[in-house]
Amino acid sequence: MGQGYVATIFAWGLARLKKGLIDPWGVPLAGVDFGVPIESLEVVASFDVDAAKVGRSLYEVARVYGLEPEPELKEVVVQPGLKLRSSPSFIKTLALDDEHPLEDARAKFEELLDDSRPDVFIDVTTTAKSKPLFTWEEVEKGIAEGSLPHSQVYAYLALERRGVAYVNAQPAHVACSPAFVDRAAERGSLVLGDDGATGATPLTVDIAEHLAERNRRVLSIAQFNIGGNADFLSLTEPERNLAKEETKSGFLENVLGYEPPHFIRPTGYLEPLGDKKFVAMHIQWVSFGGFVDELVVNMRINDSPALAGYLVDLSRLAYASLRTGVYGTVPEINLFYMKRPGPHGTRHKAKILAYRDLLSFVERLREARGLPAREAVTRARASSP
Amino acid sequence: MGQGYVATIFAWGLARLKKGLIDPWGVPLAGVDFGVPIESLEVVASFDVDAAKVGRSLYEVARVYGLEPEPELKEVVVQPGLKLRSSPSFIKTLALDDEHPLEDARAKFEELLDDSRPDVFIDVTTTAKSKPLFTWEEVEKGIAEGSLPHSQVYAYLALERRGVAYVNAQPAHVACSPAFVDRAAERGSLVLGDDGATGATPLTVDIAEHLAERNRRVLSIAQFNIGGNADFLSLTEPERNLAKEETKSGFLENVLGYEPPHFIRPTGYLEPLGDKKFVAMHIQWVSFGGFVDELVVNMRINDSPALAGYLVDLSRLAYASLRTGVYGTVPEINLFYMKRPGPHGTRHKAKILAYRDLLSFVERLREARGLPAREAVTRARASSP
Amino acid sequence: MGQGYVATIFAWGLARLKKGLIDPWGVPLAGVDFGVPIESLEVVASFDVDAAKVGRSLYEVARVYGLEPEPELKEVVVQPGLKLRSSPSFIKTLALDDEHPLEDARAKFEELLDDSRPDVFIDVTTTAKSKPLFTWEEVEKGIAEGSLPHSQVYAYLALERRGVAYVNAQPAHVACSPAFVDRAAERGSLVLGDDGATGATPLTVDIAEHLAERNRRVLSIAQFNIGGNADFLSLTEPERNLAKEETKSGFLENVLGYEPPHFIRPTGYLEPLGDKKFVAMHIQWVSFGGFVDELVVNMRINDSPALAGYLVDLSRLAYASLRTGVYGTVPEINLFYMKRPGPHGTRHKAKILAYRDLLSFVERLREARGLPAREAVTRARASSP
Amino acid sequence: MGQGYVATIFAWGLARLKKGLIDPWGVPLAGVDFGVPIESLEVVASFDVDAAKVGRSLYEVARVYGLEPEPELKEVVVQPGLKLRSSPSFIKTLALDDEHPLEDARAKFEELLDDSRPDVFIDVTTTAKSKPLFTWEEVEKGIAEGSLPHSQVYAYLALERRGVAYVNAQPAHVACSPAFVDRAAERGSLVLGDDGATGATPLTVDIAEHLAERNRRVLSIAQFNIGGNADFLSLTEPERNLAKEETKSGFLENVLGYEPPHFIRPTGYLEPLGDKKFVAMHIQWVSFGGFVDELVVNMRINDSPALAGYLVDLSRLAYASLRTGVYGTVPEINLFYMKRPGPHGTRHKAKILAYRDLLSFVERLREARGLPAREAVTRARASSP
């Protein structure tokens, strides 16, 4: 869902990985075998509402993004999705609901799903403002009214099917909506999310843990993000910006034990930075004896590849979970890969600690799938050539 | 051992902590009760070889460093130590071995220890070059020849006593010398070390772990440190610089699974920076699809307070361990607090993970001391007022 | 006008300078004699609309700001000013127009001026949105309607007098309003402004010149500012933020010859940073052969002292200009000290070049005042003790 | 002289510029016409002592460096130069003096020059330690003894010819040796140098000027440089490092009026950084009232392209000067383009000011060559397409 740069890097990189043209750097569990090898992944369908993409193959889209794609990408063509009210205003749309009533459009969308029959849905659509949904009645009311943002509508439609996983890598409340998690649990499905934790935020979580363990009192945190991709462009719309800010700073109280004054939010759009965003962060704290230390972090991060690498794992983990009978959601997965880990109310923890829990969960997957017991899952790092 | 700025901040801050004048920020386990409260710590003796310090009270020394000390610091007077061959050339010494044969000087030093009868020795002397010592014969030969650096000589003299702990917070091989660890084990004593992990190195370890968990391939790490305290001045002597460099970059292979090209070392002395060193670090890595990301960290860190805060914990942990019958060394303590954790050959791990192991060790201490079982040791952060 | 932190640092520092308690660091022309020594400056009156300040002496205000003031500051008491519609909403006011019609309030204000008879007015009030005023009719209409922001009203009232200087150190259009400059020229008065160029912007101007001279093609500039003083708090109100942004980025086209994509604006308020703001800047450019270079600048800048140091010079230069018969405005002064140099339409130039022109202007002042000719004005730096 | 990466980028880029394939970014005076257009430049010969380069065409060398060269580069083949005692130890040499007495080698070199008859020599050989040479007797003695480093020997041999220019872009004392300048003046020749001012140093000069003009008292400057090209590799040899450090920090006293404590030097070699070095700089100063500000600069700079762009100008300026009868050396050129501007004893000045003097010099060149008078030389920036 959403054939932007993330989805395109994912499809482009996956094709190259499967042919051994690149190493699996950036795929956290690349070196861990839990029965779903990278080679088994397949992109079966793509949806978008951008008139410049719908009807084009992923091969063509990849070339527009300046990538040199494998010929396999010609096999998947972008199909029209649902724009609803939440698609960004700067896009010229070609969507199922452009000229048809929403109900017809949803029906058409479900037909398209019947054709491709995906096991795992990946939501990398544009950030949209949303609220958590607590009951299925709320969901159905929102669907009927057309008031839900696109991610929640797509999640609803996905969960109309059985035995599927919905991986929500953007900030809308999906895995943090109890209604979706409960529905998934009932129907042998799974939702994972919300909002992929790449870039500065997960590093900040671990730095916060690092400081907390030394009992350093954080006085303030300022974190700026600026980039030139469509995501940053969409965040210039204030509602989206607020939605993003919420997922970026939620961890402080949980990790530090208190909420220090902070300013953490996507800050602006600057086209020449492209997908390689610039991050600046300032943290100051009290050390022993009342002395004040300062830390400044500056990063240039390729935003979309970082998330695309996670999606390789999330697809595999989602599929493996389903096959192992794990339904609803999996906090061990969400806590490592996501900025606002579901289910609703989950306490944040340092990513380095969440990784240990993730490895334990993977170990349980391995056992359930009859893979030989191992003292500890070998880290992906052991996969280096 | 070594009444420099670290030891002085320690004594000054401890006195203020005991009177409730400051909060215990920078003391990692301030909020954890394992039977040795901060209030129970007492500075009973101090040794140095700097003619400007010997014979002065800690109160006077603190004032020279620009601190406003508590009157209690008048009670401890700096006594002359052993300069040996390893004291820095820029110090005018007043040492026991200035005019007496080394053997007599050592005997005199032991007499001074008989007076103060410390439970815990803290070594915050100047960085010295050293080699690990594997057998007690090697130690005795080095002592006889006068070829060992001051830290190893002090450790030898401390271990002549029984039931004591030697906390080595500088880079010499003490806890990484099997000879000292074995001797301590035999005599109901303990050595902890080596080289307090404050400043940029432990943060770099955790950042390295953070990258490794995402399977990002580190291409290079450059880390510069410059400061204006006596430690940086001493590191302008090439042998000391090499000794320091060794403890700063040892973790890479263990944490990443490979050793990326790196330049990690104390870089220079710049007097106006004082004790608040400037750190600059550059890391670049390969992300998914072959894209290269960059991270730059700049810090201003008060070097000595950071270590002084650790010493509060290390004193308490050392004493609690001894009273619980833990002899030799304690890797769980060393792995969190030290740059080159003993015993010799210990594999490094991320500090955030080492902290968990430390908490488990402390839980065992609590049990051994009959403190009520707790689900998990509350983090120091819970101690915030 | 505006007894905030800048005005308080100015009064506090001036008193200390006059007694030789501090060196004149931060006063650009401290070492240049043009007939108005620092010692001759005197603070004769102060106006504010903050109920917490009106009626208090500068001594008391300085103590609230945590400064240790000289007793002379007791002699000046903050008087009530005009709040109009442009004072920030977060201030509890005590102003002349709180309960009286604007016309009466203005008359009362003029009475207060009759008492103190200032030669030089310094405007360091809160940032307000404004438009340039081109004719005196516009000014009078705005005054009558009560639609002008406080700075323009104060400037109007100051220019009702003769032989005075109005130094506008904030972003309102005063020296960039032709109406004020013309009026000043007619009445033997002077306006200088607008918006003191301290902090990151003047450095960015000089870095831009540095790049332009090497014919490096700037691809983008991002600059973030965050601080915890009242100025940053006021900039959280969107209209003020826009007013500030305008003066921060006006120089690019003039200095580079083209306007690169940029994001340059005050970014947020973070109380614990206090007056020492944090600045982060990223610039990338094309070098020879198409290679792309990157520059990141991070600063911690004491915002108010930097401007207070300028005010020492601006007071002296304003007074010397008036006495030499220089009326209207002085672009040579404005181009060095101001972010949006008046008069309206003035082209920006590198600050290092503007400094040369400033020295030439000062040389002309010297000549006019009969000071001995010098080959070149000695730089302030020669004044170091 | 020295077919390293700088010389190769220069030849590669020049060929592309002449064909209009790239814009002249990074060539400071690209937009200024003084009678020697970029198109008129021609590479006629190349010398090196690296066995891997001698005998290969520039086309082949460019490909080894990963550049896509124009076919014209096949026309110039690298010829063997003189290794002397100063070539770096890590190079396998193929030099004229490998197996022949130095005198014969020099004679052979002069023969090779007779073939190519260059107007302008460009020295981009490896950094070598040197002393300034004051008399021609000193030069001849050093030549006879074989004690001079390669740059001074090449300069000597170049000045055996008449009407030539020797542009020394590395740190050896050539333009700062009065003996060479005097010799050039006598023989209708020219020497320019020493050490191209690219990267962090010229920016630091301008930042220092910026601070000095505001009378801010610089407390300390730390500047680190690390890179992965052959220049940084050669600087791991201590003598070369000292030679480089000298040219990097010479400006402080001249620009600031005092020499603040500083640590400015090339710091290390880290291969994966390649030619794009990493620079970190920390400056702190006293502002008005005694407040201390801090500035941190981090850069990623493509080292060789920056210098190659300068060489385009320096070749043109050298040739234009010769044709206009300007002999000896030209401080106006050196002060802008060089780190240690000749002649010996020249006071440094801010680069932004030096640029103005350079433009005036160019204006004189224009007049001498009968180009129409212009109000001011248009800046290179006007050349943007």
Image (cartoon, coloured by chain):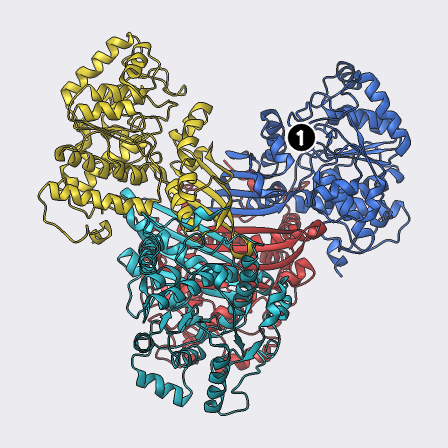
Chain colours: A cyan, B yellow, C red, D blue
Q: Which of these two is toward me, A195 or B38?
A: A195
Q: Specify the quadrant of the image occupied by residue D314.
A: top right
Residue type marked 1: Thr
Q: Position of residue A113 (x, y in %)?
A: 48, 80
Q: Specify the quadrant of the image occupied by residue C109.
A: bottom left
In this view, B228 is above or below D83? below
In the drawing, does residue D25 fall left or right of residue C362?
A: right
Q: Specify the quadrant of the image occupied by residue C383.
A: top right
In this view, D251 is above or below C126? above
Q: Position of residue B111 (x, y in %)?
A: 17, 15
Q: Position of residue D303 (x, y in %)?
A: 65, 43
In the drawing, does residue A264 fall left or right of residue D341?
A: left
Residue carrying label 1: D127
Query: Total marks drawn?
Result: 1
Q: Which of these two is toward me, B358 or A264?
A: B358
Q: Secondary structure at mark 1?
A: loop
- Measuring 38% from the left and 30% from the top, which residue is drawn there? B231
Query: Which chain's residue wears label 1?
Result: D
In this view, D350 is above or below D342? below
- Measuring 35% from the left and 70% from the top, which residue is drawn there? C91
- Measuring 14% from the left and 52% from the top, which residue is drawn there? B374
Q: Is residue C361 at least partly visible in the picture?
A: no
Q: Is residue D174 at least partly visible in the picture?
A: yes
In the drawing, does residue D346 fall left or right of residue A168?
A: right
In the drawing, does residue A269 fall left or right of residue D331?
A: left
Q: Position of residue C134 (x, y in %)?
A: 62, 75
